[in-house]
Amino acid sequence: MPSPKARRNGNRSGSISGICGNSVSGRFDFGPVHPRRSSDYSSRRRASSFSSASLFGNGAQSQENPKRLNLSFITIAFRFLLAIDLWLSKRLGVCTCEDSLLGSIRPLVKLVEVSGHGVPWLISAVYGLVYSDSAAELETMLNLLMALVLDMTLVGIVKAIVRRRPPSYSRSDLFMPFAVDRYSFPSGHATRASMCACFLLTRLVSAGSLRALLLAWAGLVGLSRVLLGQSNVTDVLFGLCLGYCHYGLVDRLWLSPERLQDILTTFLRDSLAGV
């Protein structure tokens, strides 16, 4: 019968051999597997895989739609600038009526505004064209008349496309019944003042004091529209820039007597050939 010490050594060697046997066979016995723990582990793996998939999916979606993000940013920036424009225009509309902050100077501001209207300029151009004393004056008045007609046509087209209403606090006056004046973008007065100032500065006026006076007049015409509440600030600024571009176009299309004669000759020849 073995001694207690031998029994203990035998048990120890048996346990060791059992462990080694399990390791050699390729598996270790760590005890029974709890089904609850295994299900928790699998659920955690599914959750992690789902979160990673959703993460990569959102990243792909954000990369696919950069234009939407840019468009939304542009829309927000445009509305912010539009709000500033409306707020500033309303603050500057101090001559909208007699009861306004500077309503006492409204007739003077109205006089400056009328000086940039198209009707007085058209009458002056036609009068100068009819009563010209030289070929140079005739050429200048003819091109001024062409510039005024071109300016009114282009401004009317832009207004019909944009269709921006004048400020809600604007007041109808003498020269407002025209259909083109129902819209305020761009300001036709500012466009015409800028174009006429560039025309006169380039073709007729050479004295420094008169040049400064012409520039001041063009700026005051645009400012008068805002003070009277007929246009917004952006309407006037865009109108001044557009008037400068209109004069550049007129300068390219300048009608000299020789060029006008060639145009009339070509027109008559084509008309007779068509008949």
Image (cartoon, rainbow, N blue to C red):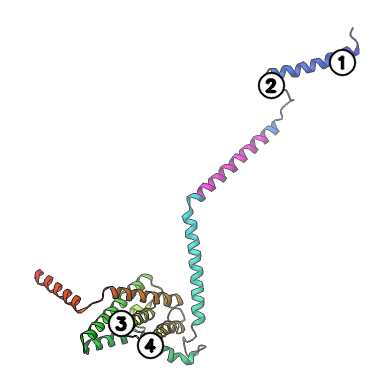
Q: Earlier in the sequence, mark 3 or mark 4?
A: 3
Kind of residue at badge 2 = Arg
Rounded to the nearest angstrom, the CA distance separating label 3 from label 1 is 123 Å
Q: Which mark's residue is nearer the viewer, 4 or 1? A: 4
Which quadrant is the C terminus positioned in? Answer: bottom left
* Kind of element beneath mark 2: loop
Label 4, on which residue?
210
Q: Residues within 10 Å of mark 3 (few under 14, many from 20)?
A: few
Q: Which mark's residue is nearer the viewer, 4 or 2? A: 4
Rounded to the nearest angstrom, the CA distance separating label 3 from label 4 is 13 Å
Rounded to the nearest angstrom, the CA distance separating label 4 from label 1 is 123 Å
Label at residue 164: none
Kind of residue at badge 1 = Arg
Label 2, on which residue?
27
Which quadrant is the N terminus positioned in? Answer: top right
Kind of residue at badge 3 = Arg
Q: Do the residues labelled 2 and 3 touch (CB within 8 Å)?
A: no
Q: Which of marks 4 and 2 is nearer the N terminus?
A: 2
Start-end of magenta stretch: 39-61
Q: In which quarter of the image is residue 266?
A: bottom left
Q: Can residue 245 be seen in this view?
A: yes
Q: Give coordinates of residue 250: x percent, y percent.
A: 29, 75
Q: Are marks 4 and 1 in contact (CB under 8 Å)?
A: no
